[in-house]
Image (cartoon, helix red, strand yellow):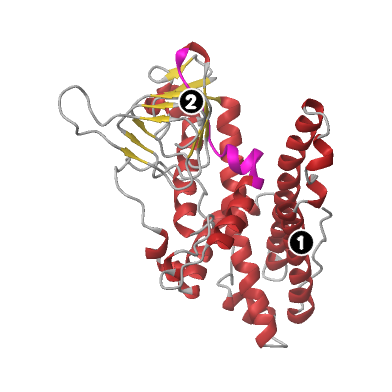
Amino acid sequence: VGYGSNVGSNHTGRIPDQETSVGEGTFWGLGCVIKFPVDLTSAPYSIIAAGVQLPPQRITLPFSLITDGPGGMNQLTPGWLLHYSPYTIARSEVKFANRRKAKRHDFYTGWKILRAGVMDMLVDARTNLVYAGGGQQQQQLAGEGVNSKKAVVFKTDKAIPGLGANQLTEKGRQIGIRAYTDAIQRYALRGLLDRLVKLAANQKGLSMGEVLHHVGLEGISVGKLPAVYSTPSKPIVNWPVLPWNEASHTDTEALWKHQHSTLLNELPSILRNSNDVNDNNIISRLLEKCIALEDDHAKRVYESKSRDDVRGANTVPGYKDVHIPAEKDSVVLSAKEEAGKVRNDTRLVEEALGASSIARSRL
């Protein structure tokens, strides 16, 4: 707002009864025009690009990028920040933590961006994206809200709930599904790893059965697990739960309960290429996936910062002399360090609990 965006008027020419509900972490681009009413509370950490005119609407696709699109309709890419600019999220978490100076209010100023409530938003958003592209549902939508028989472009929330007054390409839909899925599974698997690390530190010589019981994974049969993607529920216009009011904000058991529930729902997707999963190797397979996701996240953090380095050096004389390159950037190094910590924690778990050999992914 302080850099030249025009965020609406509350007046319709009748009475001043319009408003905007700004989502957490919303970035208003230079010169954008926001026409009331707008609700972005269920699309946190979304970017409205420079010069975009955003008509009245409600968007429920988090971490999105909204740009000018063809035909006079804005184009939305769901999960863009997660997929193409995770550096932004990683830097924001560090920035928020460093700026948190409150002494009497620290109990509600220390939440994470990728937390339980946000994961629930991602699950709902992914369900809507998956459902829009599937078989009979896609054909039914082709007549209303979807442009072309092949559904190459989805238009407005008639095609996809939560899309608002925007359009979405098939490529964008696939980007959103992958970005949301990776974030959801990374959240759940990090919860599993943290649980196992604590178990390994406190108890030795446990049988695999005892370990599986402790993390609620005993007797898992991949073939009998429910499908990951359910039918979208009817959209409800409501406020999201405030971060400090989430049960998992201060209760680690509530956090694990949510991560465990999420993990069970994701198992068919995580293990879809594993036909021989059993009690003896399920922990190893899941931790392999955890390592892969953390390495991929660190790689994307580096790449998103590196792109800026290349563009700056190709545009501004002497750019490299006064800017820290990606390979020395503290946020990039922290993400790389975190990926290394995941591999080390996995190794410790393997040694302490006797899990079968777990692959080491390379960054």
Q: Quick one: 186 or 215, which is closer to the camera?
A: 186
Q: Quick one: 353 or 243, which is closer to the camera?
A: 243
x, y percentage for residue 248? 45, 67
Using the image, determine if residue 16 lies above or below residue 167: below
Q: Are marks 1 and 2 in contact (CB under 8 Å)?
A: no
Q: Residue at x 58, y 78 (%)?
A: 214
Element type at marker 1? Answer: helix
Q: Amino acid at mark 1?
A: Glu
Q: Quick one: 182 or 284, which is closer to the camera?
A: 182
Element type at marker 2? Answer: loop
Name the disc covering residue 337, or none.
1
The answer for how far apart the CA atoms under marks 1 and 2 are is 38 Å
Residue 78 lies within the magenta run: yes
Residue assigned mark 2: 31
Which residue is most to the top? 71
- Mark 1: give few (<14), some (14-19) or many (20+) Cα within 10 Å: some
- The magenta region covers 72-87
Q: Residue at x 19, y 22 (%)?
A: 13
